[in-house]
Amino acid sequence: MNLFIKITIGSLLLVSLVSSCAQSTDKEAEFSENTKDLSWEMLSEKDQQFIDLVQRKAFDYFWNGFDENTGLIGDPAKGKRTSVATSGFGLSAYCVGIKRGWVTRDEVYRRVLITLNSYYKDPNNSKDFCVEGIYGFFYHFINVETGQRHGKCEVSTIDTAILMAGILHVMEVFEGTEVAELANKIYLHAQWDKFINKNGVLTGGWKPEEGIIGKYKGYNEYNMVYLLGMGSPTHPIPASSWDVYFSGNGGEFIKPYKDIDAFLTPGGLMQPHAYLYQFPACWYDFKGKRDKYLNHWDNAVNALKANKRYTNNWGAAHGYPEELWGWTACAGRDGYIGFSKPYNGTLAPSAVVASLPFLPEASLRAAKYMYEVYGDKIFGKYGFVDSFNPKQDWYDDGFLGIDKGNEVLMIENFRSGLMWKEFMLNKYVAVGMQKAGMENI
């Protein structure tokens, strides 16, 4: 029987001491969850070719979906809808394409310039095209051709933050160019302080019908919104908001397995969805760093180990082999499966592919198994589909920009650390990390 302990942040030291003495009795733990030394160079040529294939197909999603007029990235299967987060992932994915030799630097520069112009409103031109939003933030979903709000969606803080991460990345890659100048203007125009509530907590965004919408409690992917917001020289959120994020905001360490160290989840719930830990790490290099609250890299590793263990244990009771794991927000047979929904055996290949930097052997083994066993049921023009459920004999047939971006960037971080090396050079990123109290260890 697995232990399940909820732990306040102040009790972490005690937990660490207890967990260091604990011995695993879970047979599943024998399957390499602790493979810190496995690197790209250690892979066989066949495995490298497989990972390269997955990465290239995911890259093609962004390259082929590019709209020549707006620079936004659409998926023909979804009509004219796209997300601003897809733009952020796409900007960085294009830079990976340069590194891999799939496209030229000049080709990428031209496309990036078109994209950035669509997110920048020329103050001297009232008719200048610009993606719709408010306070320098943008609607979650937009029309690829018009840049206008799709449906009744919100101006999203997290999706705009993902966009800004891609923008700050290309600002470094194309330093000293018009791209860098535009990137700087877009970032400085964003009014991060407009989305902090009276308690100092970041909110989810804004709707014209409602105004500012709800806050998100507990540790989650919003750590990158805080870091980007604290780095702004024009409209920053206060450094004290980082403390609010960790104290009195529903952040709790949990320890559901005695041989896996404690980790933070939203509200202390045993729902370590992969995206919560992967999205910020696409750009932020947390390795060898910590603040006064935790080591964010180790926290992600522990959470993803628990992700694997939980889905493996569920799978063992329902006929799944240990290679099948990967729990994250994704499509399901009966609709979208988001955070707080009970696990039902639906697997997201992007959750394992993007875990390569954290759990390389377990991730590689799972990705290969999915590819070899399920073939074209789950692997198509742009690589792995969003999700599938073997128990239900259900296989999604679509691709998502946030999945594909997560795969491209995290594979590259596993291969070369490119995202981390380039993004962390940005001066605004450095300020945000400093205000959060991040120190080398």
Image (tube, rainbow, N blue to C red):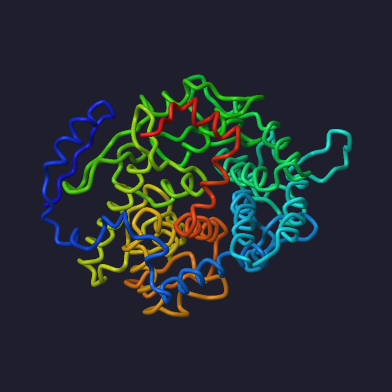
Residue 135, can we see it?
A: no
Q: Quadrant of the C terminus?
A: top left
* Residue 96 image offset from top left, x and y in percent: 59, 58
Q: Tell me: residue 232, above or below residue 418.
A: above
Which of 331/225 is in front? 225
Residue at 65 percent of width and 50 percent of height: 151
**Could you tell me how many numbered marks the image carries?**
0
Q: Is residue 254 above or below residue 233?
A: below
Corner quadrant of residue 236:
top right
* Residue 166 picture location, percent across and down: 61, 47
Q: Hey, which residue is sitting farthest front in the picture? A: 41
Residue at point 66% right, 32% down? 190
| Residue 294 position within the rendered picture, expressed as x and y whole percent measured from the top left | 34, 33
**Residue 420 seen in this snapshot:** yes
Residue drawn at x 16%, y 41% as measured from the top left: 20
Quadrant of res 323: bottom left
Residue 384 rendering spot, x and y as whole percentages: 48, 69
Q: Does residue 215 lie above or below 98 as drawn?
A: above
Relative horizontal placement of residue 149, taking residue 50 as reference (left or right) = right
